[in-house]
Image: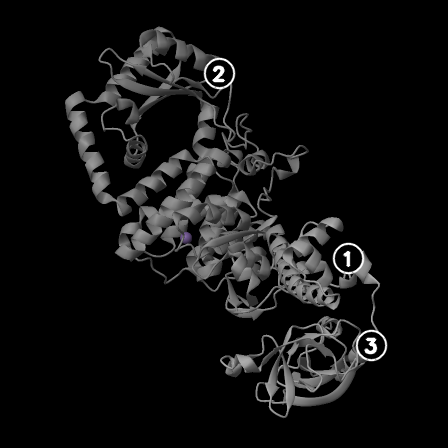
Amino acid sequence: MIDVDDLIALVRNYNPRCNVDLIRRAYAYGLKMHEGQVRKSGEPYFTHPVAVAAILTEQRLDDATIVTALLHDTIEDTRSTYSEVAELFGAEVAELVDGVTKLTNLQLSSAGSQQAENFRKLFMAMSRDLRVILVKLADRLHNMRTIKSMKPEKQAQKARETMEIFAPLAGRMGMQWMREELEDLSFKVLNPEARNSIMRRFLTLQRETGDVVHKITGDIRHELEKAQIEADVYGRAKKPYSIWRKMQEKDLAFSSLSDIYGFRVICGSVADCYRILGVIHQRWRAVPGRFKDYISQPKNNGYRSIHTTVSGRDGKRVEVQIRTREMHEVAEAGVAAHWSYREGVRAPNPFAVDPAKWIATLTERLDEGDTDEFLENVKLEMYSDQVFCFTPKGDVIQLPRGATPLDYAYAIHTRIGNSCVSAKIDGIRVPLWTRLKNGQSVEILTAEGQRPQASWIDIVTTGRAKAAIRRSLREEDRGRFVKLGQELARAAFEHVGKKASEKALRTAAKMLGLADENDLLARLGSAEMPARRVVETLYPELAMAVAEEVDAKRPVVGLTADQSFRRAQCCQPVPGERIVGITYRGQGVVVHAIDCRALEEFEDQTSRWVDLHWHSGRHAPAYTVSLDITISNDAGVLGRICTLIGEQKANISDLRFTDRKPDFYRLIIDVDLRDVEHLHTVMTALEADTDVAQISRHRDLTRRP
Ligand code: MN
């Protein structure tokens, strides 16, 4: 294990003025807290935090980050607490350690490739300081370097996570070396055969061509000496995983050198970069289309370099990158370059991207304005307007801040949203208006037949959910209104001896300036337009013919003088509805609604059927209809229902309970009405009442005349 003096020496190398006392105390505290704990490999646990700290010294990071590395597992795995860390090492360190702990606790195991991007965002959203991610990445790097002591299944799972989430995250932080190493360590676990075959071919190639790296770096150095330019030349073989990926992507064979070896020339000034480029292009032939100048046009993440590919006499191509030392630091350390020390001071690197701008480029939301205040503590505000939640399967759903379980349900599927009845967050039932937080896992409970409630509009924040709820409410209303409108139109037309055909309705809609007949019917059903108005529009000459009140003893047309009229009690037809009569010897004619199920038994006795229709005049309110109605069991509700019926000028002739539960009553109310239009007015008025859960006509086949 690296001892505390070695660690301090590593930090002092780049930061002589570091806080030695702080590091010493953190080291001693971590050692004491993890005492007795061992890693899978059998080593003392504290070797891990120390190794993580050492990795971060390679990036020359500040004291707070190094101390955080030493303490990163204390809150999670020992009896140490947030407040104790804050008391001993200050709020900044405590915040950083807490941030790393939160990331460690995220359940990433079931991440599919499609979800990886969301996980990376979740990571950033949960790290309020970029240094939290730097520590977490170093933590993962050390765990991957020592992965051999884990069980094989665990190895594969960690390697997959690393490949999908941590390696791209390192790349996004601008740390290319770390990305490459994480990828290669994962590659070794996930696809050892492929990696071995790359390594074998590598050796074969080396046998054939000799030590290419040594030869080429020597050639370049020689040319630079001749031109009297001071620069360092490095050559290296690319990592097996980079070669593998390139071969997969481009379907390339393992032969072209430029895809295997890379060369770098690191010099002192920008002017030297271009001089070196000239020297190299004079000596070797440049391959067209492979030259890129990221010095005059830097990448968003601050990367600057000149790239060119040249081919030697033997036709073999090699890629050369040319940049200054400061550019190189940014290329390797990425966002960490901001915290890096050079010669004991935090020397501003002119090419290092201000982390605030970095964040802005990551989110492509570069706002103008003062970014200086970001310099000390970089807060990650990039995803602060979003929350990321888990599905029970471990997928991540991205939602705007303030979103509720309903938003979440609609984000998954409109069907789930529409049938949502309740929600669980981290296994606990919560109200639907609860605001979601990062990293919570959410489960939606649905029920068949559940419909969106109007009150949901105020609970949701996403446009998607709002639109879906409105659409559903509208469709439901409209469907009901159109059906109701059909009945009203038919009754009104029959009243004047006409038929409410589709054609007639379409014509009326056109004359009234409406979209189509459904629009017209919906307006009739919602009582926006009286049915009489439609009749008047089409048949102005008939509209005025309001007849005298019809005799309740002879309300139908089609009976002979000696046939008496009786309403069937099973279906209780009312004026305006389509009817048929059935003759009984000595009992006269019983009038049924045309769709009454009781008519089935008379199907093959056609001689008993009598064609009838209601008188077209105004009927007396003498037709009893039974309504089956369910209302809440609250004080005053029943009284209000009765008043409502009275206000519609209908009379209640009987009322009986069929079911009484603590929360609702079910009852049958007999109401005396004029005709079908009157019936609909009463039913609509009741339906509109919030305490009426259900209302329908009660039809009872067992009741005979
Ligand atoms: Mn750790």
Label 2 and label 3: CA atoms lie apart by 104 Å
The residue sitting at 57% across, 89% down in the picture is: 702
Q: Earlier in the sequence, mark 1 or mark 2?
A: 2
Q: Is mark 1 within 8 Å of ligand 1?
A: no
The quadrant in which residue 688 appears is: bottom right
Find the distance from the CA under tag 3 to the CA under tag 1.
22 Å
Q: Secondary structure at mark 1?
A: loop
For badge 2, the amino acid type reads: Val
Instruction: Name the residue carrying label 1.
Output: 539
Q: Mark 2 = which residue?
A: 270
Counting residues from the start of the chain, the first of labels 3 and 1 encountered is: 1
- Residue 680 location (% of width, % of height): 72, 72
Q: Position of residue 548 (x, y in %)?
A: 84, 74
Check the image and report above or below for 280 versus 38. above
Could one spot residue 497 in this view of the protein? yes
Instruction: Indicate whether 238 appears above or below 411.
Output: above
Where does residue 465 sit, x and y in percent of width and height? 60, 55
Q: Amino acid at mark 1?
A: Tyr
Left or right? Give the position of 243 relative to 562: left
Is residue 84 among what the camera can see? no
Image location (x, y in percent) of residue 692: 69, 76
Disc 3 residue type (three-letter)? Glu
